[in-house]
Image (cartoon, grey):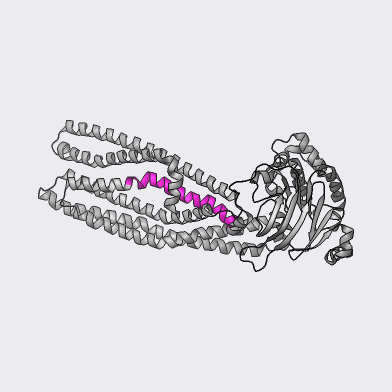
Amino acid sequence: MLIRLLQTHLRPYRRPLAAVVALQFVGTMASLYLPSLNADIIDRGVARGDTDQILRTGGWMLVVSLLQIACSIAAVYLGARTAMGFGRDVRGAIFGHVNRFSAREVARFGAPSLITRNTNDVQQVQMLVLLSCTMLVAAPIMSIGGVVMALREDVGLSWLMLVCVPVLAVALGLIIRRMVPGFRLMQTRIDTVNRVLREQITGIRVVRAFVREPYETDRFAVANTELTATALRIGRLQALIFPIVMLVLNVSSVAVLWFGAARVDSGEIQIGALTAFLAYLMQILMAVMMATFMLMMVPRAAVCAERIQEVLDTDSSVVPSPDPVTEVSSRGELELRGAGFQYPGATAPVLHDISFRARPGRTTAIIGSTGAGKTTLLTLIPRLVDPTAGAVLVDGVDVRELAPDELWRRIGLVPQRPYLFTGTVASNLRYGNPAATDADLWTALEIAQARDFVEDMPGGLDAPIAQGGTNVSGGQRQRLAIARALVRKPEIYLFDDSFSALDLGTDARLRAALKPVTADAAVVIVAQRVSTIVDADQIIVLEDGGVVGMGRHEELLENCPTYAEIVASQQTAGVPA
């Protein structure tokens, strides 16, 4: 998965990557040349007292050093830009793909996991790309070049390389092997912490209302402790790496000096060559360490890449038609023909055999007990999910055959839980229509019975709205969501229990103001209060996912026991029907 992800998203950066390889090659070769020049200074300059040789060779060392520095800076710069661009592209790909998910896929992954995959997981793979450009490319060049240059200085000490390099590689490899399961577990632990924290922040009112702060604190502490324990376990293994590397490096240095001294004494090697050999051995071991360090990053990045690719490989259950209908007559007519829906793995469908027609200029209301499938039915119309049986038609065309933009252009949805975005009142209303003027916004607010409180807010249309609309009340949030749908001026209005937070007077005024505006549109209202739908042209009564009654208020009172029971229960509870 990691290779596949890198191949896909690094393809546009082939030229910068080629430049990085070239620059790292030149810079590493320059670094390998320096010990050889230093050996010349010792053997031909210091040993012979030749000042000109020292100055001449020292000048070359300065030039080579400047070349190495320039190449390293350029390689790091290009590598960093490539890694950051890669991360940006992957995050954009995940975000765009998730936007095409239906409610089913979003529920499958969960919001906390999707957030982690688009942030922490991408960051881990991005870091691998960055370190690959700065370390991994240079490591094999330095290893191979170091071996060649060391053999050039003295073949007799080459056996030390055959001992030191495998010892270091095996020791670090054993540590990394134990770290791999920890990396996989750590990403899951991060998901859990994000989930618990998100639940606590979102449900803070419920937590405080039931005085559950100690319980939630303990729940977060458990998730946090598990993550900390996993991180510490990995950290302890990582802590072993540096001491092992330093031990091998120091023992190798002592071995080179110990066995090299005898060769110097016998005249088989000069002091400068021994110094150069020692430097090359250190460079080889450092290259092995860098390569091993990169191998330590690879397992975690591979786990993250699997999680990222899992999202990118998941196809939405709501698939656009390969040959979509883009032009239909603008009638605003909605029809369900034997529509049904069943969640994957469920033993029974949530909806079954739903059939009705909502015509322009008429209001269709849907009522039923909790769990009857009212909201699920409404999600079928804008294709948030697709029916598992039957069909949903808009203007005579199955919604699965309509182009998504064409379908959504015709629908104005006010969800059961209205959500407002961070910004201003105006920016939220213009979600419905970006080209709407201020006059259009005020008109929509007036119809939605929201003009008064918006005028009282500092800045009016420019008044700030917090994330989720938490700085306004539930009723105000509902009215702003209704105004947002009115700004869109769709052909089909879908109100999913959108009047539940309004008092009866505001509810009545809003419905009266809606009538002239929606005179040419089909209106579908899901409601709990009978008073909200009593004047509807058609009331559909749902029970256990099926239609048990259809007609006007008076007809249903006589012919539908379920509806009569709902009306009676609300009258008993003191709710006007």
Residue furthest bottom in the image: 347
The answer to if 110 sits in the magenta stretch is yes
Total numbered circles? 0
Q: Is residue 485 left or right of residue 302?
A: right
Residue 266, given in percent of the width and then of the height, sits at 9, 50
Q: Is residue 405 left or right of residue 292?
A: right
Asked if residue 112 is positioned above or below residue 411 in the image, the reply reads below
Residue 128, given in percent of the width and then of the height, sits at 42, 49
Q: Residue at x 64, y 45 (%)?
A: 325
Judge whether residue 387 can be spotted in this image.
Answer: yes
Asked if residue 532 is positioned above or below residue 549 in the image, the reply reads above
The answer to if 186 sits in the magenta stretch is no
Q: Quadrant of residue 198?
A: bottom right
Q: Nearer the viewer, residue 187 or 344?
A: 344
Q: Is residue 267 left or right of residue 109?
A: left
Q: Residue at x 21, y 47 (%)?
A: 150
**Which secondary structure is most common in the magenta stretch?**
helix
Q: Quadrant of the N terminus?
A: bottom left
Q: Which residues lie in the magenta part?
A: 109-138
Judge whether residue 421 can be spotted in this image.
Answer: no
Q: Is residue 145 left or right of residue 262?
A: right
Q: Nearer the viewer, residue 559 or 455?
A: 559
Q: Residue at x 30, y 57 (%)?
A: 168
Q: Nearer the viewer, residue 59 or 441?
A: 441
Residue 17, given in percent of the width and then of the height, sits at 39, 41
Q: Quadrant of the C terminus?
A: bottom right
Residue 467, given in percent of the width and then of the height, sits at 67, 47
